[in-house]
Image (tube, grey):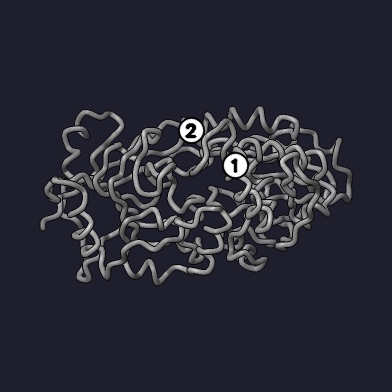
């Protein structure tokens, strides 16, 4: 079997980039005049999640400094549900891997899996809240606004989800994901948010939106009474600015790495077209990848391979990298057990591709539509097979950097990554 030759493309995406992230963070918080609400000496919990948000350490450092300027005593709490293996130390390690340390941010990190049940929603759902955050005088909810990987609505991932899943820790995330089987995502989000905003002394939100190049496009401080209204608007911007594959019809998508720092689902289902079905596009997806091959895990995911179950094939080295306990905990907590399923594993990338290309239809493998990406956050540069050449020539948003060249397998039959 022959493999197609590949073109290296750069994609042009529209979207702004902030020039000074720290200054914008401070200016946004200053505009809320938090000194009228937060008194000198009062403690403020700043949330930090498990996603690989661009400049997150700088944003938290700037927020900490701004709060100190009004006399407050900020500290950081990991707000990441069951991630980090569902342990306090595991969650602290995730923050450290992003550069969020006490030394850099100037704020202590208080990591615990303990929660306080602050109330019960009208649906009978207990509302869990991180104990350290609950004991603080105030809370600043910091999080990225973006499309969710499994739910569709006016609110998806953002400040509300950070209050719900992130600050709910393992216990809260587990009960909320169970409740989603009986109630809509929006019903639960609004009910839990009502409780938290009325009882947990949330002083502000710090909403982050990124552009298609995984860069900070917008930071906005939001007053608690505007969370719902403003997050709806920011979600539309996030959808407009998000990255995408260069072509919607793909025989085989090769993904160099997945991880929790890339997406809650390991790889963003909005990008790969598996939002509603783990192993095939639906009429509601805008992308159709017939098969997906996952080649590795990010260092920052700490072995959490959640989302690998969406791939049809992988390699043995990826399976060996996986912390199956952490993966299992995360998948079960999220009510998505198939996300932890291990696909067919081969010793080499070449073997995996030879096998899986036999299953994409009657197309000859050398003529198949293959796209290789670094991950679903970094799509500015991709590799595509020659099948797409006629379309490439007609697209002003695509530039050929190199090729067509033979696929770059090493002596062990493994592909070179997109990002060299």
Residue 326: mark in rendering: none
Left or right: residue 101 versus residue 273 is right
Indicate the position of residue 327 as horizontal and vertical percent values: 50, 63
Indicate the position of residue 79 as horizontal and vertical percent values: 66, 53
The front one of 249 and 179 is: 179
State which quarter of the image contains the N terminus. Answer: bottom left
Label 2 neighbour load within 10 Å: few <14, some 14-19, many 20+ = some
Indicate the position of residue 153 as horizontal and vertical percent values: 55, 32
Left or right: residue 350 versus residue 85 is left
Label 1 neighbour load within 10 Å: few <14, some 14-19, many 20+ = many
State which quarter of the image contains the C terminus. Answer: bottom left
Left or right: residue 280 versus residue 84 is left
* Residue drawn at 41 percent across, 58 percent down: 308
- Residue 20 can be seen, yes or no: no
* Residue matched to label 1: 21
Number of marks: 2
Indicate the position of residue 260 as horizontal and vertical percent values: 50, 55
In the image, residue 220 above or below residue 256:
above
Residue 239: mark in rendering: 2
Mark 2: which secondary structure?
A: helix
* Residue drawn at 49 percent across, 57 percent down: 337
* Residue drawn at 62 percent across, 32 percent down: 231
The front one of 295 and 329 is: 329
Mark 1: which secondary structure?
A: helix
Q: Is there CB contact under 8 Å for labels 2 and 1?
A: no
In the image, residue 301 above or below residue 370:
below
* Residue drawn at 39 percent across, 53 percent down: 310
Q: CA distance from mark 2 to mark 1?
A: 21 Å
- Residue 339 can be seen, yes or no: yes
Disc nearest the viewer among 2 and 1: 2
Left or right: residue 169 versus residue 32 is left
**N-term-proximal mark, 2 vs 1:** 1
């Amino acid at each position: 079997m022959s493999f197609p030759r590949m073109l290296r493309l750069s994609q042009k995406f529209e979207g702004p980039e902030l020039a000074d992230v720290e200054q914008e963070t401070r200016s946004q918080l200053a505009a809320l005049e938090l000194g009228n609400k937060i008194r000198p000496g009062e403690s403020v919990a700043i949330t930090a999640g498990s996603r690989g948000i661009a400049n997150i350490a700088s944003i938290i450092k700037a927020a900490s400094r701004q709060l100190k300027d009004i006399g407050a005593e900020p500290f950081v709490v990991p707000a990441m549900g069951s991630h980090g293996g569902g342990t306090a130390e595991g969650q602290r390690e995730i923050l450290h891997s992003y550069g969020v340390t006490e030394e850099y941010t100037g704020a202590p990190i208080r990591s615990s899996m303990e929660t306080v049940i602050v109330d019960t929603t009208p649906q009978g759902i207990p509302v869990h809240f991180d104990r350290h955050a609950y004991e603080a005088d105030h809370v600043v909810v910091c999080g990225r606004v973006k499309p969710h990987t499994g739910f569709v609505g006016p609110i998806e991932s953002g400040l509300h989800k950070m209050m719900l899943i992130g600050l709910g820790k393992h216990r809260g995330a587990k009960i909320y994901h169970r409740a989603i089987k009986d109630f809509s995502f929006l019903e639960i989000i609004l009910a839990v948010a009502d409780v938290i905003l009325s009882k947990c002394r949330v002083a502000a939100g710090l909403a982050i939106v990124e552009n298609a190049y995984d860069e900070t496009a917008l930071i906005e401080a939001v007053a608690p009474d505007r969370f719902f209204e403003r997050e709806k608007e920011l979600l539309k911007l996030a959808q407009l600015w998000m990255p995408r594959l260069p072509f919607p019809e793909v025989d085989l998508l090769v993904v160099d790495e997945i991880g929790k720092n890339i997406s809650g689902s390991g790889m963003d289902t909005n990008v790969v077209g598996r939002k509603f079905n783990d192993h095939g596009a639906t009429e509601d997806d805008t992308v159709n990848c017939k098969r997906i091959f996952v080649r590795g895990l990010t260092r920052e995911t700490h072995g959490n391979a959640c989302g690998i179950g969406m791939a049809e094939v992988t390699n043995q080295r990826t399976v060996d990298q996986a912390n199956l306990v952490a993966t299992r905990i995360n998948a079960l907590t999220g009510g998505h057990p198939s996300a932890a399923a291990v696909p067919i594993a081969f010793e080499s990338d070449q073997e995996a591709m030879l096998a899986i290309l036999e299953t994409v239809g009657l197309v000859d493998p050398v003529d198949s539509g293959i796209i290789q990406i670094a991950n679903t956050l970094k799509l500015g540069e991709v590799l595509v097979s020659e099948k797409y050449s006629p379309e490439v020539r007609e697209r002003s948003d695509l530039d050929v950097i190199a090729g067509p060249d033979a696929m770059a397998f090493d002596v062990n039959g493994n592909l070179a990554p997109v990002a060299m």
